[in-house]
């Protein structure tokens, strides 16, 4: 994959005006997940902190990332999504880089996320930024 570097990508904390984009990205992400094997495990953590970021070009939001913490130093990227027409220009990378920068400032000690089997683009995004597989969970519907 070759990233386009001549675009001026912005990344910023999501505000109230971004609520609709975040909701839309969450819905599209869930729809897209149906094409992959497996499912995300339900987690029941008490969220104490949230980091919501949006990114795009110009003034158009094209991607988002939401990370949460149950502990003050252990975080999870709960969702990262880039509009399909805006992929491969570096928006996902910009979101993850800003997330890492922000969490380092907050003195985070751990960051994790998940990618569904077959979602190679998501796995590769995480691995480019040092997030590597820790456990492979297997299951079967009975």
Image (cartoon, helix red, strand yellow):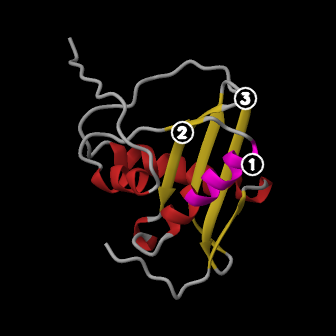
Badge 2 density bin: few <14, some 14–19, many ≥20, Cα 10 Å:
some
In primary-sequence order, the first of circles 2 and 3 is 3
Specify which label sits upstream in the sequence, 1 or 2.
2
Residue, far right: 16
Q: Which residue is mark 2?
A: 78
> Dominant secondary structure of the magenta stretch?
helix
Residue farthest along the bottom direction in this orientation: 6
Residue at image coords 29%, 28%: 136
Range covered by the magenta-colored residues:
97-106
Q: Secondary structure at mark 3?
A: loop
Q: Is residue 89 left or right of residue 35?
A: right
Where, by quadrant of the figure, is residue 47 drawn? top right
- Classify the position of the N terminus by image quarter: bottom left
Compared with 8, 100 (above or below) is: above
Mark number for residue 72? 3
User: How far across and how far down the image is residue 14, in percent?
Assistant: 72, 55
Disc 1 crowd, CA 10 A, few/some/many (<14, 14-19, 20+): few
Q: Earlier in the sequence, mark 1 or mark 3?
A: 3
Q: Assign the C terminus to one quadrant of the image.
A: top left
* Outermost top residue: 142
Q: Which residue in the protein does label 1 denote?
A: 105
- Of badges 1 and 3, nearer the viewer stands 1
Q: Nearer the viewer, mark 1 or mark 2?
A: 1
Q: Nearer the viewer, residue 28 or 42?
A: 42
Circle 3 crowding by C-alpha within 10 Å: few under 14, some 14–19, many from 20? some
Residue 10 place in picture, x, y as percent: 65, 72
State which mark lies toward you, 2 or 3. 3
Q: Is residue 93 magenta?
A: no
Residue found at x 33% / y 27%: 135
Say which element carries label 1. Answer: helix
């Amino acid at each position: 994959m070759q990233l386009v570097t001549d675009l001026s990508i912005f990344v910023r904390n999501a505000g109230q005006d971004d609520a609709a984009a975040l909701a839309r990205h969450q819905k599209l992400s869930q729809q897209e997940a149906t094409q992959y094997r497996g499912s995300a495990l339900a987690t029941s953590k008490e969220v104490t902190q949230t980091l919501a970021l949006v990114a795009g070009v110009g003034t158009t939001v094209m991607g988002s990332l939401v990370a949460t913490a149950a502990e003050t130093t252990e975080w999870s990227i709960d969702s990262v999504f880039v509009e399909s027409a805006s992929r491969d220009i570096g928006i996902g990378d910009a979101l993850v880089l800003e997330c890492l920068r922000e969490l380092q400032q907050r003195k985070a000690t751990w960051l994790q996320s998940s990618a569904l089997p077959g979602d190679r683009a998501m796995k590769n995004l995480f691995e480019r930024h040092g997030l590597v597989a820790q456990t492979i969970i297997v299951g079967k519907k009975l």
